[in-house]
Image: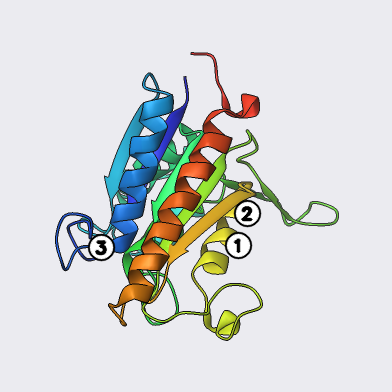
Amino acid sequence: MTTLLHIDASARPGSSAETRFGSHSRRLTARFLKRWKELQPQDRVVYRDVGQAPPRPVTGRWIHAAFTRTEEREPWMKEALAESDLLVDELLGADVIVTGVPMYNFGMPAQFKAYIDNIVRVGRTFGFDRAREGEPYWPLVTDGKTLVILSSRGDYGYEPGERLENMNHVEGGIAVPFGYIGITDVHSVAIEYDEFADARLQASIESAEKKIDALVRRLAERPAQRKVA
């Protein structure tokens, strides 16, 4: 049985498939999960809505606690890391991480950045040893997880080789920290033209949905993705 971790980061609470001012990224994650369950109904889905319930941002106390050895942590340190521990546990328990992350001002929403800051954890998702020869940092999440980034953009032309490629800090801003902890199998699909709200937006939605359907088929049927419960 495969476990999917479904994370939505949009500040918009609804899906654009259901309401005029709903979220396109939520629309895409919902479609991904619906198509997946049609193919693999026995699989487990864990849901987290960081758009509506953001993780607490990292603080000085959080940093102090995270870089203190586990056996040396005081009670307040364990409390400071409690939410982070929950988020890390969810991540480690998942085989496929499906994220809905819209573009806000060329980057990810602050809510999702707070999520990333909570799951990139020394001793839990990456290792560090200043005395280690060569690279002092190494990934600890090495069990072949897959990351899916489903995004939406107001303008168009943010794909590699297009007019605004250098202004897109969403997919790269997510893939880099996830790759740092060991999750390097990354797939992405995005809707564009949101601010134009014309036929080009509708065409982009239809194209993205077709790409998601194809992606789900590839991933759900891939033997390496399956785990025996």
| Residue 178 coordinates in the image, percent (x, y) | 56, 54
Q: Nearer the viewer, residue 45 or 152?
A: 152
Q: Around disc 2, counting alpha carbons within 10 Å, would you say few (fewer than 14), some (14 to 19), or many (20 or more)?
A: some
Residue denoted by label 3: 23
Q: Nearer the viewer, residue 221 or 186?
A: 221
Residue denoted by label 1: 176
Q: Around disc 3, counting alpha carbons within 10 Å, would you say few (fewer than 14), some (14 to 19), or many (20 or more)?
A: many
Report the amino acid beneath label 1. Val
198 on left or right of 207 = left
Vertical position of residue 150 compared to residue 70: above or below = below
Label total for image: 3
Vertical position of residue 129 compared to residue 218: above or below = below
Numbered disc 3: secondary structure: loop
Pointer 2 and pointer 3: residues touching (CB < 8 Å)? no
| Residue 170 coordinates in the image, percent (x, y) | 49, 69
Report the amino acid beneath label 3. Ser
| Residue 124 coordinates in the image, percent (x, y) | 53, 42
What is the CA distance from the residue labelled 2 to the residue labelled 1? 5 Å
Q: Nearer the viewer, residue 161 or 185?
A: 161
Find residue 129 and name its label: none
Residue denoted by label 2: 179
Q: Around disc 1, counting alpha carbons within 10 Å, would you say few (fewer than 14), some (14 to 19), or many (20 or more)?
A: few
Which one is closest to the eye, mark 3 or mark 1? 3
Residue 74 visible (yes or no)? no
What is the CA distance from the residue labelled 3 to the residue labelled 1? 25 Å
**The residue positioned farthest toward the right in the image shown:** 133
Looking at marks 3 and 1 on the same chain, the residue that comes earlier in the sequence is marked by: 3
Numbered disc 1: secondary structure: helix
Residue 94 visible (yes or no)? yes
What is the CA distance from the residue labelled 2 to the residue labelled 3? 27 Å
Tell me the quarter of the picture where residue 37 sits.
top left
